[in-house]
């Protein structure tokens, strides 16, 4: 591995953040790195500061303590960082193609190049036949595909994703996870992905950062050493996947013993395929 691959693309060092004039402590002592091309998931209960971390990395807010660096500098909103939200947030007055073209036009790309890139991205997410459709004519899953294509259109070095699949049905979530893995494995941008879903975090990530309840602190950083590309070789039937799952749930139970209630954690980490957290 070369030195560039080892040098962190994103660094957080002793980061703290408060709101409401200091009355609400959201984050405390957050320190971690993200390397170029790495997929890192943030997992933790509601209110532990996962979205706040994304906003700090994107330069939308500044830390009260510590430092956040992207490529060695304090971050500012720019086209090297793209963000995908839980809802696609498409421009309703623009077509599917127009939503992607708008972002590319801000970058100053010539129109012929924009057209080629838009069509290629829509083909990649299976929506080329919907280029002239408007957002209200699409399902929620299709809108999220457009949002993903729009984020990738600027070829960002960093892709920030805030529970992008949480509001979708199970089948659509599965399809989009596979699509995300396929596109990430080919493009290798750095991804910071927020989720409540333990299985989703293991499936997608190279490392998982488990956060404690407010104020958000890092409980553990868990490496995910599973074969890639996972969009071709689903690891969920492997013993290593089950071991990681059991380890993370063990850490969550330990949080409950340290003060967070089982009910709070059960709501934060739903497990539709298994027993309730209180039964573990």
Image (tube, rainbow, N blue to C red):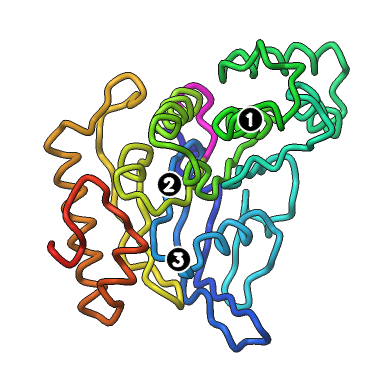
Left or right: 103 with respect to 63?
A: right
SS at mark 2? strand
- Name the quadrant of the N terminus: top left
The span shown in magenta is 185-190
At 16% from the left and 39% from the top, the residue drawn is 240
Are the residues at dot 1 and dot 2 in contact (C-beta closer than 8 Å)? Answer: no
Q: Position of residue 107 (x, y in %)?
A: 83, 32
Q: CA distance from mark 1 to mark 3?
A: 27 Å
Q: Pick whichever, 259 or 95, lies toward us.
A: 95
Q: CA distance from mark 3 to mark 2?
A: 18 Å
Sequence-earlier tag: 3 or 2:
2
Residue corresponding to mark 3: 46
Q: Quadrant of residue 106?
A: top right
SS at mark 1? helix
Left or right: 204 with respect to 105?
A: left
Q: Which mark is residue 40?
A: 2
């Amino acid at each position: 591995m070369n030195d560039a691959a080892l040098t962190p693309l994103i660094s957080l060092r002793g980061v703290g953040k408060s709101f409401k004039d200091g009355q609400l402590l959201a984050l405390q002592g957050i320190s971690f790195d993200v390397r170029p091309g790495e997929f890192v998931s943030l997992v933790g209960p509601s209110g532990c500061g996962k979205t706040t971390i994304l906003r700090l990395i994107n330069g939308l807010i500044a830390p009260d303590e510590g430092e956040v660096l992207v490529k060695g500098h304090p971050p500012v909103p720019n086209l090297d960082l793209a963000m995908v939200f839980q809802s696609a947030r498409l421009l309703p007055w623009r077509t599917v193609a127009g939503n992607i073209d708008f972002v590319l036009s801000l970058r100053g790309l010539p129109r012929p190049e924009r057209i080629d890139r838009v069509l290629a991205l829509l083909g990649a997410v299976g929506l080329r036949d919907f280029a002239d459709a408007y957002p209200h004519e699409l399902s929620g899953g299709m809108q999220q595909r457009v949002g993903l294509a729009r984020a990738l259109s600027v070829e960002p070095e960093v892709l920030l994703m805030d529970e992008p699949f949480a509001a979708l049905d199970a089948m659509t979530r599965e399809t989009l996870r596979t699509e995300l893995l396929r596109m990430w494995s080919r493009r290798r941008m750095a991804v910071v992905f927020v989720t409540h879903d333990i299985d989703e975090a293991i499936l997608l990530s190279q490392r998982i950062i488990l956060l404690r309840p407010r104020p958000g602190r890092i409980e553990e950083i868990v490496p995910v050493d599973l074969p890639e590309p996972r969009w071709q070789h689903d690891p969920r039937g492997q013993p290593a996947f089950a071991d990681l799952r059991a380890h993370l749930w063990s850490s969550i139970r330990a949080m409950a013993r340290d003060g967070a209630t089982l009910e709070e954690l059960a709501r934060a980490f739903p497990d539709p395929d298994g027993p309730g957290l209180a039964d573990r």
